[in-house]
Amino acid sequence: MHTKELQYWKHHHSFGTDIKTSGERRTKCVIAVTFVMMVIEIVAGTVFGSMALLADGWHMGTHAAALSITVFAYIFARRHASNPRFSFGTGKVGALGGFASAIGLGIVALFVFGESITRLASPTIIRFDEAILVAIVGLLVNLTSAFILRDHHDHHVASEHHHDHNLRAAYLHVLADALTSLFAIFALVVGKYLGWVWMDPVMGLVGSMVIAHWSYGLIKDTSSVLLDAEVGKNKRESIREKIEGKNDDRISDLHIWRVGPKHLAAIVSVVTHEPKDADYYKTLLSDHSDLVHLTVEINRCPGGPH
């Protein structure tokens, strides 16, 4: 067989990761906004001698670093999309980036929790006016960033839906910052006018618990993709019904896993008394448009039908 003829049966394994997505562009935009805000706050904090501004400026720096993980994952997946070393492409790199970001969110939650406990035990003097101003500016910046990164799919977390986990991780990072800013504004206003200084660390504890909850959810979703455990029962049963609904064909082994945000691969082992060619079984599953890499193994069962 000539190489030219063989090309008919060959196919790529990039599964969309070779294209620059809107998620990558939006994340870069948010990093730029965050970096500019970081510089402004650090300069202002230095000039005006405000520790609150300086602290939030450096916090913005860590925020930009965390978002850089998202951009790195996009770039790495795109550059290595055609690399044959990755057997099924680089579709899982996004989930890996999301998993790393989820761990970062968890660390942030632990840090905020620990700092809040410390401040409950040893209250510190709060410069309310400056702190409120910083929290308001931070809230506006993070709400703008969340608007840029918004993804309607993020509100329907189910195993049968497709997600860009990398983009979702970036979205949760800015959402976590917006939430802590909102809690901070509430606590600082109450502390300033009612004298309830303890409200600031209490709101810190509440914020840390919410962030930890988001971190756990993202770790659960991304680890399912990384461990090939994301595809749910409905998809498996649908494939089984398509194959076993004809003649006496039975599936003896079925493996389904995600190779990209919108793409699945599967290995189907069929046992039958009346074997057909692989194209017959692939046609039965043709309505599963997300099933882009299908391998069919056909085994003849000896003896009569039963």
Image (cartoon, rainbow, N blue to C red):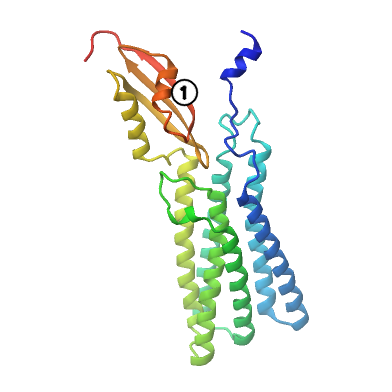
Q: Nearer the viewer, residue 251 or 280?
A: 280
* Residue 176 image position (x, y, % from top left): 53, 65
* Residue 110 image position (x, y, % from top left): 51, 64
Q: Is residue 28 above or below residue 296?
A: below
* Three-letter residue code for mark 1: Thr
What residue is shown with label 1?
Answer: 295
Q: Quadrant of residue 140?
A: bottom right
Please report the residue visible at 62 percent of the width from the left and 47 percent of the height from the top.
21
Q: Nearer the viewer, residue 53 or 171?
A: 171
Residue lying at the far left of the rendered structure: 306
Viewport quadrant of the N terminus: top right
Please report the residue visible at 67 percent of the width from the left and 44 percent of the height from the top.
75
Q: Secondary structure at mark 1?
A: strand
Q: Nearer the viewer, residue 48 or 106?
A: 48
Please report the residue visible at 50 percent of the width from the left and 81 percent of the height from the top.
186
Look at the image and tell me whether residue 121 can be seen. no
Q: Is residue 270 left or right of residue 169?
A: left
Count neighbours of disc 1 (C-alpha within 10 A) and say few if under 14, some if 14 to 19, many if 20 or more.
Answer: some
Q: Is residue 124 above or below residue 152?
A: below
Viewport quadrant of the C terminus: top left
